[in-house]
Image (tube, helix red, strand yellow):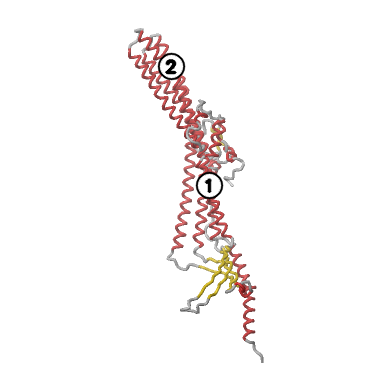
Amino acid sequence: MHGFSRTDSHIENSFFSNFFFLAVYPAIILVLIIISGCAAVGPDLQTPELSAPDSWHTEMAGGLAVSETTPDDQGTWWQVFQDPLLTRLIENAAAGNLDLQKAVVRIQEARALYGISQADDYPVLDSSGLIQRQQTSEETGFGKVSGFYHAGFDTAWEMDIFGKIRRSQQAALAEVETRQEAMAAVLVSLQAEVALNYLELRTFQERLVAARGNLEVQKETYEINVSRFNAGLIGELAVHQAQYILEQTRSQIPLLQDGQGRAANRLAVLVGKRPGTLHEALTEEHAIPCIPLEVVMGIPARTLRQRPDIRRAERVLARETALVGVAMADLYPRFHLIGTFGLEALSVGNFFNSSSRFWGIGPRVSWRLFDGGMIRQTVAAQSARQEQAMIDYQAVLLTAQEEIENAILAFAKEQLRRDSLVKATAAARNADRIARDQYQAGLVDFSNVLDAQRSLLSFEDQLAQSRGAVSANLVRLYKAMGGGWQHRAVFGPESNFFQ
């Protein structure tokens, strides 16, 4: 009876070992890979319902009308003013503003971080090499000189069984989108800021025109009073009264010029230039741009949905929701597939022999069994952040509705105020003309002229400010509706800000 020899037994064990490796082990790896494609742990984003009223609370007046619109309908809202210089300033600001450039770079940073998270889908491959000559101690060894030669590769790949990597990628992508919406909000604010400063500058110029016009009339009145005083027709009091109202009007001009210069400097900074560089282009006086006869507003839900701050709040909620899954994944084991292979020898001559080869491959499992509740507390903390993001979303939604309603109200009511000031200014001009005629005819004393001229200057100044306020309130209304970020043409054809 013949039995297996020791060598035969070794061959048999080796055969079954290789059979297990070649047949069973790949099947296990395949199963793990399939499992890694299953749903990730943690909550999925439940997009919050955008609760909006069916119609705006404030009554539509002053040319306002509600209609179905698309985001592109208000993409170039500044063109309603039909002012080429304003359009050019806004386009230059989109190209040169430093805050906007910073927002763009922040998007690039987030995209790079998202790219880093995507790299986790692939295995990591490291290489190493070593050439070493060494001699043992003659006191503790044989004093032998020997060499060691090594070259190899190590690889590792994490199988995303419970979705930590996928949730991390979702969070990174949501951060990219968050910063894109933040940049859109910067753009909307920038366009409105340019328009508001431009309108402020034109308002100062119109107030200057009114002040200078009144100054010329008051100067003429003062000279007439001086002549009449020298002729003994009036007393000295009328001369001084004419002089102080003249100088009071003259004292307003430097303040108005200061405001005009400040607005021009601010516009220069907004377009990314040094203060003072736009003065030459802006010094020529122009009237305040007129508003259109009709301003179309979208329905509440559509209007609110196009606001960048609301979309940004929703993306923040998406990021915090994904991070809950990242935290929860640490409650489960992590699976890695690791491998190593290379050459190793004690002499150069044997380095490339088949006997110098080494390799190893297999799965590795790690699972934190006890941490004093740290992971669960981390999940609880991240869940609280998710809830905060939901509350922030609701707060942003309410604030947005408040801003739009206030902007509608301000735009309509300022037009009523302007219309009254138009009538008051016309009446003040007539009163000033009549008072001067009657004074020269000796029918009234100079106090009537004084009151009439003071009132005329006040009403003309208020009318100029109100005209500017009407146009400015329209700008604020477009800003509140989130208009402007959709107009990608302001960045040029090569722009990839929103890609």
Q: Nearer the viewer, residue 319 or 150?
A: 150
Q: Note whether 60 is above or below 22 in the view shown.
A: above
Outermost residue, left side: 236
The part of the image, by quadrant, that contains residue 297 is top right
For badge 2, the amino acid type reads Val
| Mark 2 secondary-structure assignment | helix
Question: Quarter holding the N terminus?
Answer: bottom right
For badge 1, the amino acid type reads Val
Visible residue check, residue 3: yes
Q: Residue at x 49, y 60 (%)?
A: 327
Q: Note whether 331 is above or below 265 in the view shown.
A: below
Q: Note whether 333 is above or below 246 in the view shown.
A: below
Disc number placed over residue 217 in the picture, else none: 2
Residue 335 rendering spot, x and y as whole percentages: 55, 66
**74 left or right of 427?**
right
Q: Badge 1 local density, few (<14 within 10 Å), some, or many (20+)?
A: some
The part of the image, by quadrant, that contains residue 305 is top right
- Residue beneath disc 1: 105
| Mark 1 secondary-structure assignment | helix
Outermost residue, bottom side: 1
Residue 290 rendering spot, x and y as whole percentages: 53, 28
Visible residue check, residue 70: no
Q: Nearer the viewer, residue 89 or 288?
A: 89
